[in-house]
Image: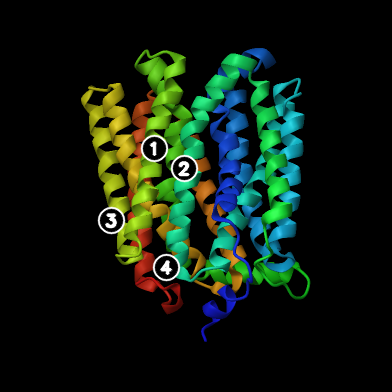
């Protein structure tokens, strides 16, 4: 019996996939849902545009850094207990943020909220891999992504509706309530899927990460997965300026355009769930990312030609997101399968690379006075880096990754 088989046979009861999806999308929901409220919150708090954008940047940063901690901690202390701590932080800081009196307090609370919310991102993925072999895990991750993608797609619309009806603070009351619901479901329905032995220590955590960082396959899958997926965050961050400032569209339409883009991720995840059982995972991953690169090149050509319009932005971004929806579960499954003995650590490090790429792309996309041009360049470069990284992973992949 292989090591991977021994690991996935340990759980006596599988975790509900819908609950793992709910836990996973809650972390990113808190990022997307606040985007439409940025102008109103800024006016209410007397904050500048840069200060309000900081509430987004620190959230992405928190999602990145927090995953480095939750992955290895869940390997040592168990998935359920570590997740519970994260959900308490998520719910508590969400409630506190609803009463923030100045932007600096809000920035700090957004960072803490991200540190709590990222627990679901890491541990949800680790639980899927705990209970399935590599190819089955990729299919389950695709199905989970399918459910998770509903959140970011609906989040801008939900954020706009809540802000219009009840004000921007209502968003944080809602997020606090969601955290409380997740905590209740976790306590009642989520089994422990990972056996733990010994106690955590810094040396062990460092060795786990060291093994992963020395693996060209893991690095290729992780960097490629981040560039293929969360590079979209750069476009999302500047999209209000593209649609309202460059194209003169009203503020309330931004949420609609973003929802159309994110629907591409949803459909891509649906396609991945059907394609993964029939085709080699790695080739789906590479092909899907290649389609995203072509979409980004089309967007760049549109911007350079001076024929920018809503359809010529939303269309390419939809296809970029569609490719990302297919590539995401494939890259993630392969990355966390490189070493089945440290799945939690791998999930955390993969998540860090994803959010790190997202944070870098968001920062770069905000440069210059032509956000559409900058965002298009970011997407093209990120897509090409993803292609190179995936080919490196294919070249050095370990047999236990179950790639083919």
Q: Quadrant of the C terminus?
A: bottom left
Mark 1 to mark 4 CA distance (whole Å): 25 Å
Secondary structure found at label 1: helix
Distance between mark 3 and mark 2 Cα atoms:
21 Å
User: Residue 367, relative to residue 216: is it above or below?
Assistant: above
Label 2 environment density (alpha carbons within 10 Å; few <14, some 14–19, many ≥20) = many
Q: Residue 210 placed where, x, y %?
A: 59, 69
The residue mark sitting in front, 3 or 2, is 2
Rounded to the nearest angstrom, the CA distance separating label 2 from label 1 is 7 Å
Residue 135 - label? 4
State if disc 2 and disc 4 touch (CB < 8 Å): no
Mark nearer the N terminus (4 vs 2) = 4
**Snapshot quadrant of residue 78:** bottom right
Q: Earlier in the sequence, mark 3 or mark 1?
A: 1
Determine the residue positioned at 53% across, 77% down.
Answer: 4
Residue 149, numbered circle: 2
Q: N-terminal of the two: label 2 or label 1?
A: 2
Residue labelled with disc 1: 263
How far apart in space, not on screen, are marks 4 and 3 (Cα)?
17 Å
Q: Residues within 10 Å of mark 3 (few under 14, many from 20)?
A: some
Q: Secondary structure at mark 3?
A: helix
Query: On the image, numbered disc 3 is attached to which residue?
Result: 287
User: Sequence-wise, which precedes: disc 1 or disc 4?
Assistant: 4
């Amino acid at each position: 019996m292989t090591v991977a088989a021994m690991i996935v046979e340990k759980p006596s009861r599988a975790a509900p996939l819908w609950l793992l999806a709910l836990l996973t999308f809650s972390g990113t929901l808190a990022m997307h849902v606040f985007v439409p409220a940025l102008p109103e919150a800024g006016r209410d708090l007397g904050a500048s545009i840069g200060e309000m954008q900081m509430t987004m940047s620190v959230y992405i940063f928190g999602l990145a850094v927090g995953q480095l901690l939750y992955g290895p901690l869940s390997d040592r202390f168990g998935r359920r207990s570590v997740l519970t701590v994260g959900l308490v932080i998520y719910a508590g800081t969400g409630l506190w943020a609803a009463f923030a009196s100045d932007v600096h307090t809000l920035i700090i609370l957004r960072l803490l909220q991200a540190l709590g919310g990222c627990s679901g991102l890491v541990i949800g993925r680790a639980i899927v891999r705990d209970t399935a072999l590599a190819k089955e895990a990729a299919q389950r991750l695709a199905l989970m992504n399918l459910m998770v993608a509903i959140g970011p797609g609906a989040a801008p619309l939900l954020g706009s509706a809540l802000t219009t009806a009840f004000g921007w603070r209502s968003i944080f009351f809602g997020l606090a309530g969601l955290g409380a619901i997740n905590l209740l479901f976790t306590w009642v329905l989520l089994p422990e899927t990972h056996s733990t032995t010994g106690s955590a220590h810094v040396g062990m955590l460092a060795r786990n990460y060291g093994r992963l960082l020395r693996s060209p396959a893991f690095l290729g899958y992780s960097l490629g997965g981040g560039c293929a997926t969360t590079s979209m965050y750069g476009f999302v961050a500047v999209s209000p300026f593209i649609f309202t400032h460059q194209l003169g569209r009203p503020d309330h339409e931004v949420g609609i355009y973003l929802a159309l883009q994110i629907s591409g991720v949803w459909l891509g995840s649906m396609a991945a769930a059907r394609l993964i059982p029939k085709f080699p995972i790695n080739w789906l991953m590479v092909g899907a990312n290649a389609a995203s690169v072509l979409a980004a090149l089309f967007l760049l050509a549109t911007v350079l030609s001076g024929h920018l319009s809503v359809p010529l932005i939303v269309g390419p971004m939809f296809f970029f997101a569609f490719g990302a929806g297919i590539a995401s579960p494939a890259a993630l499954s392969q990355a966390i399968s490189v070493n089945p003995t440290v799945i939690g650590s791998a999930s955390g490090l993969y998540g860090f690379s994803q959010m790190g790429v997202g944070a870098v792309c968001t920062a770069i996309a905000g440069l210059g006075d032509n956000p559409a041009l900058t965002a298009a360049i970011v997407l093209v470069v990120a897509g090409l880096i993803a292609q190179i990284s995936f080919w490196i992973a294919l070249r050095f992949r370990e047999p236990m990754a179950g790639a083919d």
